[in-house]
Image: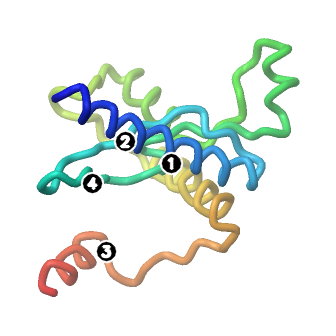
Amino acid sequence: MTANLFDRCADVCFRLFARGTELAAQRGLILVDTKYELGLLGDEIVLMDEVHTPDSSRYWYADTYDELFRKNKNQRALDKEPLREWMLERGFRGDGQAPVMTDEVRIATATRYILLAEELTQRSFEAPELTAAERVANILRG
């Protein structure tokens, strides 16, 4: 990667983070950190994968941030950290066979994702009729 391309990518990331921070603040949330996946299409920088989702980002509630920080307590969060911790407790670190998730873990994770979607969009979540695989297949069929 050239220094120029790095600077262009950094600019994209900083602008995305600034906008995400602004939108989160409007909803009473703090965008703590995130990751962006960038690529090139010719000479154009393109953004790939999800943006500001619980899979790529951590959010904390702004209304309790100061109090919890002062008390050195964990922040109220909307992210996948509980799922990550559940996996780590069972010895899974990304390699090998993943543990089978219980319905309780699946529901708790989905609930966090839905809460974040509703907080950010200010709309009630409506599950799509088609599965993700069906939606992707439809898009690829054109």
In the rendered image, which residue does mark 1 sit on?
109
Residue drawn where x is 58% and y is 43% of the image: 18
Q: Residue at x 40, y 44 (%)?
A: 12
Kind of element beneath mark 2: loop
Instruction: State the image quarter where residue 26 is shown.
Output: bottom right
Few, some or many C-alpha atoms within 10 Å of disc 2 (few <14, some 14-19, many ≥20)?
Answer: some
**Helix, strand or loop for disc 3:** loop
Say whether disc 3 or disc 2 marks the residue closer to the N-terminus.
Answer: 2
Residue 125 vs 13, above or below: the answer is: below
Label 4 sits on residue? 46
Q: Residue furthest front?
A: 4
Q: Where is residue 111 in the image (x, y as percent from the top left)?
A: 58, 55
Instruction: Name the spot of residue 128 as percent of width and height, x first.
Output: 43, 79
Task: Decide which of tag 3 and tag 4 comes sooner along the chain.
Answer: 4
Q: Which residue is drawn at 58% across and 49% down?
A: 20
Q: In which quarter of the image is the N terminus?
A: top left
Whether 37 is drawn above or below 64: the answer is below
Distance CA(mark 2)–CA(mark 4) = 10 Å
The residue tagged 3 is 131
The quarter of the displayed image where residue 2 is located = top left
